[in-house]
Image (tube, rainbow, N blue to C red):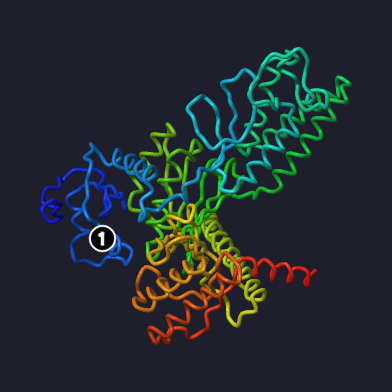
Amino acid sequence: MFNIEEELKKLPNKPGVYVMRDKEDNIIYVGKAISLRNRVRQYFRKNNKTARIEKMVSLIDHFEYIVVDNEAEALILECNLIKKNRPKFNVLLKDDKTYPYIKIDLASDYPTVFITRRIVNDGSKYFGPYANPGAAKEMVSFIKEKYKIRQCRVLKEKTRPCLNYHINKCLAPCMGYVTKEEYRQQIDEIIDLLEGKTDKLVKELQEKMKEASQKLDFEKAAYIRDKIQAIERVSEKQKVSNLSENNIDVIGIAKSELETCIEIFFVRGSKMIGREHYFYADLGDMEEKEMVAGFMKQFYLDNPNIPNKIMIKEEIEDRDTIEKWLSTMLGKKVEIKTPKKGEKLRFVEMAENNAKVTLENKEKEKSEILMELKEVLELDQLPRKIETYDISNLSGEYTVAGMCVMQDGVIKKNLSRRFKIKTVFGQDDPRCMEEVIIRRLKHSIENPKGGFGELPDVIFADGGITQIRAVQNAIQKVKEELESNNFENELVVRSKAELQINYAEARREKS
């Protein structure tokens, strides 16, 4: 039996990482500390804790810790454990998916450019990550359109060149039609393009174009001219700043009641060459500086493109430790700055303002979706909380029901539920549906602050009229049994098929 008070007395006064677990032995939080004794004890003492930390502490059943030599080692171990276990109460990099990078396989004699989601220490050069995969695909398409690099992932000797050579899209290294040095010149140009060094690249290309013209090689000169124009069009999208530093990331943050948006600008060669944004839900009352610190740890953990300087709005607790960690990974000094005035402060504010706009646009899209649903379903109010139900079984046995929830336009995975059918035997979907709806409604009426939350505005049932009647019967039975007045607004019940029909009719009327 794990006795928390007794285990707190055993904590060493050394740096390390602590792991909080619940009754099911799931990891719910990972943290680091200069002194494990002082840090872990704080969670179990009466002090001013945020609601989020209070909730986390209430779920702790036992904890464990790992002692390390210094705070930098603790930081690296903390980052790796968070990435591996994805604890509920840690700041995570959006979700469990990996983000795309643009990869150039420099170890190859004739490198190619492609998108990957996996970073391998194989001598390749990576650019990213891209939160928007479309941006990565657009850039790779541009490169393959303007540069005659090989399109095949595996280079093999052939008896004749492929179609790309004949349509002037490849120099056919598989046939030995181009030397390694000539081919590598293209790759160097592509690297300059991806690093934002467009001024240098355009200048070099202009010299090559002039040289080709002097040699009366007008076809080559025209090809280089078109490439210059295309690169200049790409660079026009980049915002030129007055920052003198060449290699900076700028982080801004914006919060709403439902979500948080973190925006990051990438400045290379005094130009903003790109930006990405990441959304977080259910961070509650976490302080902004804590969110930013958690984001930075996860974002730069496996990121090969670490800048020389990172600019943020507020000082973070782990600044010195994170600086040392990033400097070690980059091989040269990395600074985290909080500018107080001038152009640098305006740039941080611009990142913050863009985060606000991005968040507002996303919430506006959700509102538009809810408004459209309101019209399609002919509702009197916005369907802020929608629950959908489906019954599943295996040859009439092992019957279960699934419930999915959308709140204010956001899918709430934490509110999803699976019900084991208790009173129905055999395959009878309508009766199963009725049982599940009765159980679900009773949960919210009898325990309004429980895990099911408030009652839904709309219930969708997968099926036809029999399932709809089953849901309506369940609602009526709950009203009569509990004599409940909780149904201030009449619950709207619809089938998935009915929604599809209504939506199609609404679309036809609009067109």
Quarter of the figure with residue 191: top right
Q: Residue at x 67, y 73 (%)?
A: 376
**Residue 70 in picture, x, y percent from top left:** 25, 39
Quarter of the figure with residue 152: top right
Near-viewer residue (69 or 375): 375
**Residue 337 in picture, x, y percent from top left:** 43, 50
Near-viewer residue (201 or 281): 281
Q: Residue at x 47, y 50 (%)?
A: 95
For residue 285, above or below residue 381: above
For residue 48, above or below residue 66: below
For residue 403, above or below residue 128: below
Give the residue type that dot 1 points to: Val
**Residue 309 in picture, x, y percent from top left:** 47, 44
Does residue 217 appear to the left or right of 91 in the view shown? right
Q: Secondary structure at mark 1?
A: helix
Near-viewer residue (69 or 284): 284
Disc 1 designates what residue?
A: 57
**Residue 464 in picture, x, y percent from top left:** 61, 68
- In the rendered image, the quadrant that contains the C terminus is bottom right
> Disc count in the image?
1
Q: Residue at x 77, y 18 (%)?
A: 161
Quarter of the figure with residue 185: top right
The 10 Å Cα crowd at callout 1, few under 14, some 14 to 19, many 20 or more, is: some
